[in-house]
Image (tube, helix red, strand yellow):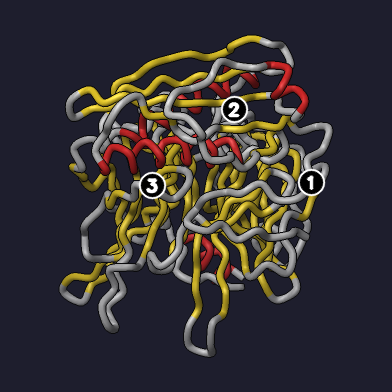
């Protein structure tokens, strides 16, 4: 059974309710009937105040498309409507009565004007029900930073309407084997926008990078690198400055150094070490490199996840004879240990929600991995996936409304396809955000 723990721990092997809507080019299209709980939202096609270049016109259209796409992810809150082509180059005066008859709640419009190499974009949002303008802002943007600016504006509008933070400025860190050549497996760490766009490669070791984790402020990345030299295999832990891409080894103890996550404040981490011959979870001070044991048991303890306040840790252990999920107080050694999962043959990758009230994890059940959610005290077990491939590596979005995860599809006896998908917290699949980018694993969702 300890072999199962090690397999889950080093993330080298991955196995195989909801209606699924395929996303074409990652654009979410409203599907189904609008309900009373959803507010109808319409973004008009862009208006152009004077001539623009073809590239600027395409960028402007992409910006409006991105606004629609952003809000369409929140399918429980908004019902996005298709826009009719504009009949004028100028934005017409708002007619609240007309839009009210169409049951529109939020009406968005963007007018663009050329300003040299840049575009001046005036974004306006009208609350038709309240008969008032709730957002009006003009920004100067260019083609390069159009996506970033659009996500920022979407986030501001969402906060204005909902009163909470959105996912629109968030990023997902993940691992892909797309650089593998022939029999040589190469896995590197990448980062992308939450919708799968703007992919950036972070590591470039030419080896096997696994188990990435980001600091809460998004400035530092920790990950493990499996490499071989002089017929000796090493499994060391690295720390990277995300801005400079400079990385250094921070733990190279005998055995495995992996499964690390940042503790609140970013100056300490929790990691798994096997230097004693058994997998235990330790706290490490990043400055002094001093270690303190968090777990101390003859069974293997791996894969920690910590709440934002640092007062509760969940982890994987085979103390019961099979890999199950436990919690403890990480401020002591073996303090307040409690088993909270009892589903499936064994479990993997437990991850806290941002508020620490829930844990999402995968469980081997019915000959494949599926995702489950439960309260941090072990109550309220909910199955999130079924008959949707083999699903692992769940991670909550920064607002707790969504879960990103990997799903593996068997293509043939010798080939499988593994991509990153997004669902809402209740298991409604929104779609795949990676396609044709190799086998993608270990997503970790962060707000930047």
Q: Residue at x 64, y 70 (%)?
A: 389
Q: How many residues crowd around disc 3 within 10 Å: few (fewer than 14), some, or many (20 or more)?
A: some
How far from the left and from the top, in percent, is residue 54?
Answer: 27, 43
The answer to whether residue 260 is above or below residue 4 is above
Between label 1 and label 2, give the one nearer the viewer: 1
* Side of 326 where 306 appears, left or right: left
Label 1 and label 3: CA atoms lie apart by 31 Å
Residue 33 bears which disc, if any?
1
**Which quadrant of the structure image shows residue 429?**
bottom right
Return the residue at label 3.
192
Q: Nearer the viewer, residue 446 or 324?
A: 446
Q: How many residues crowd around disc 2 within 10 Å: few (fewer than 14), some, or many (20 or more)?
A: some
How far from the left and from the top, in percent, is residue 358?
Answer: 69, 38
Residue 17 bears which disc, if any?
none
Q: Nearer the viewer, residue 226 or 288?
A: 226
State the residue lying farthest toward the bottom: 413
Label 1 and label 2: CA atoms lie apart by 43 Å
Q: Residue at x 62, y 37 (%)?
A: 353
The answer to whether residue 45 is above or below residue 231 is above
Return the residue at label 2.
311
Contact between marks 1 and 2 (CB within 8 A): the answer is: no
Label 2 and label 3: CA atoms lie apart by 30 Å
Between label 1 and label 3, give the one nearer the viewer: 1
Q: How many residues crowd around disc 1 within 10 Å: few (fewer than 14), some, or many (20 or more)?
A: few
């Amino acid at each position: 059974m300890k072999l199962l723990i090690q397999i889950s721990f080093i993330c080298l092997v991955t196995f195989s309710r909801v209606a699924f809507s395929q996303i074409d080019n990652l654009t979410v299209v409203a599907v189904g009937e609008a309900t009373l709980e959803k507010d109808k939202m319409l973004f008009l096609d862009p208006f152009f105040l004077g001539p623009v270049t073809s590239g600027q016109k395409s960028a402007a259209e992409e910006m409006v498309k991105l606004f629609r796409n952003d809000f369409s992810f929140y399918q429980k809150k908004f019902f996005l409507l298709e826009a009719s082509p504009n009949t004028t180059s100028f934005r017409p005066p708002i007619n609240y009565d007309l839009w009210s008859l169409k049951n529109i709640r939020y009406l968005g419009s963007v007018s663009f004007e050329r300003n040299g190499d840049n575009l001046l974009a005036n974004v306006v949002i009208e609350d038709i029900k309240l008969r008032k303008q709730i957002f009006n802002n003009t920004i100067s943007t260019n083609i390069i930073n159009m996506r970033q600016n659009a996500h920022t504006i979407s986030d501001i509008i969402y906060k204005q309407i909902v009163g909470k933070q959105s996912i629109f400025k968030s990023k997902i860190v993940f691992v892909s084997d797309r650089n593998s050549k022939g029999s040589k497996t190469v896995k590197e760490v990448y980062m992308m926008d939450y919708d799968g766009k703007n992919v950036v490669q972070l590591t470039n070791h030419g080896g096997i990078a696994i188990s990435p984790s980001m600091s809460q402020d998004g400035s530092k990345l920790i990950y493990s690198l499996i490499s071989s030299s002089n017929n000796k295999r090493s499994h060391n832990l690295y720390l990277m400055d995300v801005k400079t891409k400079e990385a250094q080894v921070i733990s190279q103890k005998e055995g495995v150094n992996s499964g690390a996550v940042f503790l609140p404040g970013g100056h300490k981490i929790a990691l798994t070490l096997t230097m004693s011959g058994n997998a235990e979870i330790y706290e490490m001070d990043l400055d002094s490199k001093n270690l303190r044991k968090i777990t101390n048991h003859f069974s293997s303890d791996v894969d920690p996840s910590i709440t934002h306040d640092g007062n509760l840790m969940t982890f994987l252990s085979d103390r019961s004879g099979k890999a199950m999920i436990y919690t403890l107080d990480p401020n002591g050694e073996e303090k307040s240990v409690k088993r909270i999962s009892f589903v499936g043959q064994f479990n993997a990758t437990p991850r806290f929600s941002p508020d620490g009230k829930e844990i999402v994890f995968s469980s081997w059940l019915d000959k494949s991995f599926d995702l489950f959610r439960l309260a941090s005290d072990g109550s309220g077990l909910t199955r999130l996936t079924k008959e949707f491939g083999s699903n692992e590596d769940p991670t909550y979005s920064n607002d707790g409304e969504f879960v990103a995860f990997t799903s593996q599809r068997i293509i043939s006896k010798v080939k499988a396809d593994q991509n990153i998908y997004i669902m809402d917290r209740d298991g409604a699949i929104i779609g795949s955000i990676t396609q044709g980018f190799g086998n993608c694993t270990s997503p970790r969702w962060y707000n930047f």
